[in-house]
Image (cartoon, rainbow, N blue to C red):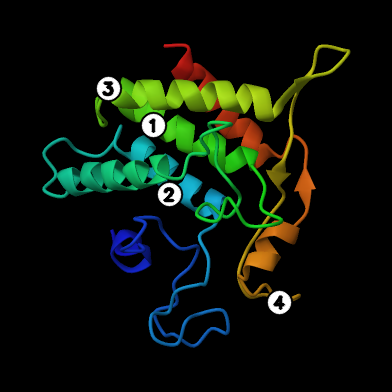
């Protein structure tokens, strides 16, 4: 709830990668405390966490409705940035037309999982089945490759991205699009297995 309150961009409805309450980090805006960009996988973890925790969150909890509303608002914003041609999402979600940006597997898989599971479990409107199907087909076309031995590989996965640290990660656009890209990173394979099970229902 704090992330939704402080990290959500009022124009796009998307969430920034980070927020520093003290507003002292070098990557943080001195007025808002926000990092400068919206990174796909950070939002992916967020929507996956919400849709998964709802399975265990007490039905009569007074704040349960808040979580369902947050889930709905965030995935609704994500749909606006789903690439029309491929059906998936970019590494820097809201800057798909910018040079160097690329379609990124882990975030696309996580978003699709949250939408499909949310629709399967009744947390989201049934229209998200169709959105998830389009994204699923895009994931298979853009990222999934079966090699000559029949092994499934997931391509175009951002290896890691963070803020601060040493060497320093400043959260600029150039930082995100130049981080290492790899195949079969577990941050994509795990969510892909979970998504596959939801698509199979």
Q: From mark 4 to mark 1, how far is it between C-alphas?
A: 34 Å
Residue hosting label 1: 115
Mark 3 element type: loop
> In the rendered image, which quarter is residue 169 located in?
bottom right
Residue under circle 2? 46
**Location of residue 3 (image quadrant):** bottom left
Which sits earlier in the primary sequence, circle 4 or circle 2?
A: 2
Residue 168 - label: 4
Q: Earlier in the sequence, mark 3 or mark 2?
A: 2
| Residue positioned most to the right | 148
Q: Circle 4 — which element?
A: loop
- In this rendering, position of residue 32 left or right of residue 88: left
Task: Tell me what residue is drawn at x 72 percent, y 50 percent.
Answer: 159
- The CA span between labels 1 and 3 is 10 Å
- Please name the residue that numbered disc 3 is placed on: 126
What kind of element bears circle 2?
A: helix
Q: Position of residue 165 (x, y in %)?
A: 67, 75
Mark 4 vs mark 3, foreground winner is: 3
The reply to whether dot 4 and dot 1 touch (C-beta < 8 Å) is no
Q: In the displayed structure, would residue 186 be above or below residue 162?
A: above
Query: Mark 2 Cα within 10 Å, few/some/many (few <14, many 20+)?
Result: some
Q: CA distance from mark 3 to mark 2?
A: 21 Å
Label 2 near label 3: C-beta < 8 Å?
Answer: no
């Amino acid at each position: 709830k704090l992330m939704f309150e402080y990290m959500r961009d009022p124009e796009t409805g998307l969430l920034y990668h980070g927020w520093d309450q003290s507003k002292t980090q070098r990557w943080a805006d001195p007025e808002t405390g926000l990092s400068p960009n919206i990174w796909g996988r950070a939002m992916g973890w967020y929507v996956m966490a919400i849709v998964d925790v709802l399975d265990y969150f007490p039905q009569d909890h007074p704040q349960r409705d808040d979580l369902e509303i947050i889930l709905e608002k965030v995935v609704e914003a994500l749909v606006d940035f789903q690439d029309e041609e491929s059906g998936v999402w970019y590494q820097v979600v809201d800057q798909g037309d910018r040079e160097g940006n690329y379609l990124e597997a882990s975030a696309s898989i996580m978003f699709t999982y949250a939408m499909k599971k949310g629709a399967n479990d009744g947390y989201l409107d049934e229209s998200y089945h169709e959105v998830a199907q389009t994204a699923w087909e895009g994931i298979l076309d853009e990222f999934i490759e079966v090699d000559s031995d029949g092994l499934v590989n997931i391509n175009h996965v951002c290896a890691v991205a963070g803020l601060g640290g040493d060497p320093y990660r400043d959260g600029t656009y150039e930082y995100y699009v130049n981080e290492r890209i790899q195949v079969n990173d577990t941050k994509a394979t795990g969510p892909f297995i979970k998504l596959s099970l939801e698509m199979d229902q």
